[in-house]
Image (tube, rainbow, N blue to C red):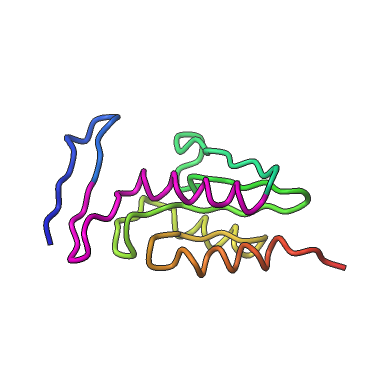
Amino acid sequence: MTTTVGNGGAHSSFIFATKGGFMAGESEFKRKLIAQIEREYPGAIVLKNDANALQGIPDHLILWGPHWAAFDAKRSKTAPMRPNQPYYIRKMNMMSLAAFVYPENKEEFLNDLQQTFRPRG
């Protein structure tokens, strides 16, 4: 497995070679995940949270009708976490849905999102 990592600047990119070809890095994974959420939930608002406002808050908030969910996209299950991230994921998951999302659990997250956003009553 080969890994190419950018220089760490604002526009750095990550490409990870796998046996089956190339797997996009975190930013490409996040872009595709947000696009899929917006397709599946028309009118949804996906906000990018300010990590400087509250350290560890999940990167994104999804608002759809009376529902909400939060997620932090990672390039893999083993990607490092920032301080306080697990705390806020657990806390927000007790309120609605919050999760770390990576390619290995993307479908599980989308299924959980569907359950969270289903009509109640």
Total count of labels? 0
Return the residue found at the far right: 121
Left or right: 71, with 73 as reference point = right
Left or right: 101, with 77 as reference point = right
**Residue 105 screen position, x and y as percent:** 43, 67
**Residue 51 screen position, x and y as percent:** 45, 38
**Residue 56 screen position, x and y as percent:** 45, 48
**Residue 88 screen position, x and y as percent:** 52, 55
Quadrant containing the N terminus is bottom left
Residue drawn 54% across the image and 51% down it: 36
Pick whichever, 55 or 104, lies toward us: 104
Residue drawn 18% across the image and 38% down it: 6
Return the residue found at the far top: 10
Residue 44 position (above or below residue 101): above
Q: Which residues are magenta?
A: 15-41
Return the residue found at the far front: 20
Residue drawn 64% across the image and 41% down it: 45
Pick whichever, 121 or 54, lies toward us: 121
Q: Quadrant of residue 2?
A: bottom left
Magenta stretch encompasses residue 34:
yes
Q: Quadrant of residue 23?
A: bottom left
Magenta stretch encompasses residue 92:
no
Q: Quadrant of residue 20?
A: bottom left
Left or right: 14, with 101 as reference point = left
Residue 118 position (above or below residue 69): below
Residue drawn 66% across the image and 51% down it: 41
Quadrant containing the C terminus is bottom right
